[in-house]
């Protein structure tokens, strides 16, 4: 059985000193990892080294943007002395250490010409002699700075252990610098990405990029341009699927608040028990599951815009609180005792007849007048038929790109079917139809049979009666001939080449189906609508 022999004499002293150094290095490591404030952590590290190892002074010099060494933090030195100190790489002891990446020990600083003493530590020692130890700080094996410490002069000191100890400390500092740089790079990347996304949103929801040139939409654009630059409360009215949310986006991103939050709340989608806490937030302990404080949508939208969709679905108690928030510009969290000031622009949208709701007593009259300051009416798609083809072309381009398909246009029969349909679901229904048509389309053209059954049945669209096989094939043949003549602007020879047949056969088919080629000569060549998302 092994016998443990207690250490005594010099060995015991050495072991105790080594244990103390390991303990100090552990504290240095914990200090550097305990905060993201690198400068504060480095200051604490130098204080630990100065207190535990008898340093006269210590400093950390790092390369700046001009590739010069500047003292980042120091201990035992005045900030007036260190604030102006700069070293070029290769200049003095510190510059030499960074240039070579190797530590340097100066046993007697007063006898070393490369010891420039720009911090005045040698002068501050008076007639006393000092020693200087400088070790490199590296990041990914590249020197980025130096740790320099001054010690009282001891003629018997060999400095091997000190160089190793301070080298380990410098290695820890280098790791902390690397982590901070990675975090800073990530932060800058997130800031840039956030800025880019905000710009993309602003461009995407610019009202000039909304698809539609009809007279009703021109009136909407004019109203949006008028109200966007103000802080006026806006009420957007119209049927479901007409694009009320897009107009709300356009108002926000065309306003001075474009860089601030745009918070959306679907009043109809939230249960009655949750709508109040979602809008105004709650304090910890306000109810059973309220374990922590939560900010409401009003607070989250502070400085920006709050969009209340389906505002007509709000309950009467919530309407009272919303009215107070609009009048006083302040809210009360559930369970809170102090009112909170909010700076929010409100945009509301509804597909309900609010005047009727006021008469029936389901919507407060005073809230109605608070919301209905500036009203924007979104016309249904059946009232803006000139926009149907523009919207359809836009959606074809959008979903063809997403699906990776080469779908370029819509056939005449499909256009006729869309133009004769009444579109109860408005733009949303049209978008869904085109998405489906692009999905099932097996060529470069969307034909009538690619559209949903609701557009193809005689009962709904009145455009596709029941046909026998011969009539159906003839209709499809006529459709292809019409498309070819439209593309060739009435040129039969060119149309025949497009269809892979002869001009004689094409002329026979033209006479058979009673097609007037002359009407295509004056029509402009079909083209897709501009990309106005």
Image (cartoon, rainbow, N blue to C red):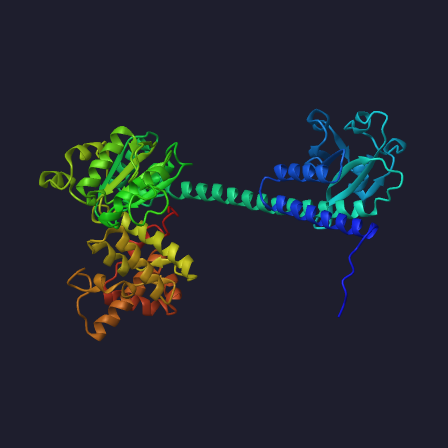
Residue lying furthest left: 360
In the image, residue 506 sits, relative to residue 323, either above or below, namely below
Visible in this render: residue 281?
A: yes
- The quarter holding residue 86 reads top right
- Picture coordinates of residue 73 (x, y %)? 68, 34
Image location of residue 8, percent across then percent down: 81, 53
Q: How far across and how far down the image is residue 395, in percent?
A: 35, 54
Q: How many marks?
A: 0
**Where is residue 6 shown, x and y percent of the image?**
78, 57
Q: Is residue 3 left or right of residue 494?
A: right
Looking at the image, which residue is at 68% across and 39% down?
A: 48
Is there any visible trace of residue 61 in the rendered image? no
Q: Residue at x 72, y 31 (%)?
A: 76
The residue nearer to you, when weighing 456 against 435, is: 435
- Which quadrant of the view contains residue 34? top right
Which residue is more in the foreground, 42 or 429? 42
Picture quadrant where residue 258 is located: top left
151 left or right of 212 in image? right
Q: Residue furthest bottom?
A: 469
Question: Which of 145 and 46 lies nearest the eye of the viewer?
Answer: 46
- Name the residue: 83% across, 50% down: 10
Specify whether 488 is left or right of 386: right
Looking at the rendered image, the quarter that the N terminus falls into is bottom right
């Amino acid at each position: 059985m092994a016998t443990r022999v207690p250490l005594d004499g010099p060995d015991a002293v050495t072991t105790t000193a080594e244990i103390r150094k390991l303990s100090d290095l552990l504290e240095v490591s914990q200090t550097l990892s305990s905060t993201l404030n690198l400068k504060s952590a480095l200051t604490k590290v130098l204080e630990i080294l100065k207190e535990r190892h008898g340093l006269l002074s210590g400093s950390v010099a790092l390369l700046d943007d001009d590739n010069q060494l500047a003292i980042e933090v120091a201990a035992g030195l005045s900030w007036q002395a260190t604030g102006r100190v700069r070293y070029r790489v290769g200049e003095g002891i510190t510059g030499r250490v960074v240039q070579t990446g190797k530590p340097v020990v100066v046993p007697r600083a007063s006898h070393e010409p490369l010891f420039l003493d720009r911090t005045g530590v040698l002068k501050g020692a008076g007639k006393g002699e000092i020693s200087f130890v400088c070790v490199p700080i590296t990041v990914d094996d590249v020197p980025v700075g130096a740790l320099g410490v001054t010690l009282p002069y001891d003629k018997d000191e060999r400095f091997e252990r000190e160089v190793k100890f301070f080298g380990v400390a410098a290695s820890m500092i280098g790791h902390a610098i690397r982590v901070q740089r990675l975090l800073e790079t990530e932060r800058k990347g997130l800031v840039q990405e956030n800025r880019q996304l905000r710009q993309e949103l602003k461009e995407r929801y610019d009202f000039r990029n909304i698809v539609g040139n009809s007279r009703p939409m021109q009136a909407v654009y004019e109203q949006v341009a008028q109200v966007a630059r103000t802080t006026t409360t806006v009420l957007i009215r119209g049927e479901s699927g007409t694009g009320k949310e897009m107009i709300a986006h356009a108002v926000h991103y065309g306003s001075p608040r474009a860089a601030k939050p745009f918070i959306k709340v679907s009043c109809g989608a939230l249960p009655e028990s949750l709508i109040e806490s979602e809008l105004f937030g709650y304090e910890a302990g306000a109810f059973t599951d309220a374990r922590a404080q939560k900010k409401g949508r009003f607070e989250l939208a502070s400085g920006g815009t709050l969009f209340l969709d389906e505002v007509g679905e709000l309950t009467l108690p919530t309407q009272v609180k919303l009215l107070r928030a609009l009048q006083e510009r302040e809210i009360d969290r559930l369970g809170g005792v102090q009112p909170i000031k909010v700076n929010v622009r409100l945009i509301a949208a509804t597909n309900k007849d609010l005047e009727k709701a006021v008469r029936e007593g389901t919507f407060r009259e005073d809230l109605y007048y608070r919301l209905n300051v500036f009203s924007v009416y979104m016309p249904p798609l059946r009232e803006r038929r000139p926009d149907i083809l523009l919207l359809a072309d836009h959606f074809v381009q959008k979903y063809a790109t997403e699906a990776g398909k080469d779908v370029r246009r819509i056939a005449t029969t499909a256009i006729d079917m869309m133009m004769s349909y009444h579109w109860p679901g408005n733009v949303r229904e049209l978008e869904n139809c085109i998405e489906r048509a692009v999905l099932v389309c097996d060529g470069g053209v969307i034909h009538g049979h690619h559209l949903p059954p609701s557009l193809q049945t005689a009962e709904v669209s009145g455009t596709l009666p029941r046909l026998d096989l011969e009539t159906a094939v003839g209709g499809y043949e006529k459709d292809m001939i019409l498309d070819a003549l439209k593309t060739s602007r009435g040129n039969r020879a060119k149309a025949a080449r497009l269809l892979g047949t002869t001009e004689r056969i094409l002329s026979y088919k033209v006479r058979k189906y009673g097609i007037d080629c002359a009407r295509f000569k004056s029509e402009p060549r079909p083209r897709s609508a501009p990309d106005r998302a």
